[in-house]
Amino acid sequence: MSTLPITANYRRNGDDWAVTVRAAGKELDATAPGLIAARLAADQLVEEIAVGRSARAVVHLLDGDALAFSVAYLHTRAGLAPPPTG
């Protein structure tokens, strides 16, 4: 079975974070009160969109940028303010 490529794209939505998960022509959306909560919501969306598929690869993006997501997420996990986006 081939690996299912999945993208999870995050963006600020006022004080909240919105995330869109895309795979195989499907798209699911969620909004959460912070980046950590949005990351957890993305995990749930991935489970829903990839039901029955154990081989999958998820790339997390902040406004389309994987490095920007990693920097913002690690800052947030460390209790630091995420750097400005855009």
Image (cartoon, grey):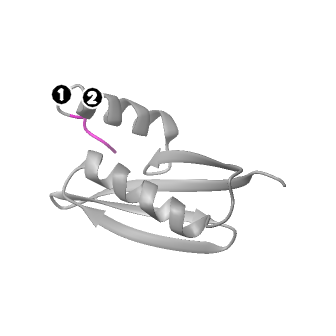
Kindly report the secondary structure that dominates the magenta region of the rendered protein: loop
Residue at 42% from the left image edge and 33% from the top image edge: 70
Which one is in front, 52 or 62? 52
Secondary structure, mark 1, is loop
The circle drawn on residue 80 is 1
Q: Which residue is mark 2?
A: 75
Secondary structure, mark 2, is helix
Tell me whether circle 1 and circle 2 mark residues in contact (CB < 8 Å): yes
Residue at 50% from the left image edge and 50% from the top image edge: 64
Which one is in front, 66 or 38? 38
Disc nearer the start of the sequence (1/2): 2
Question: Is residue 11 on the magenta stretch?
Answer: no
Q: Residue lying farthest right?
A: 1
Task: Measure the C-alpha gap from mark 1 to mark 2.
Answer: 5 Å
The circle drawn on residue 14 is none
Which one is in front, 24 or 47? 47
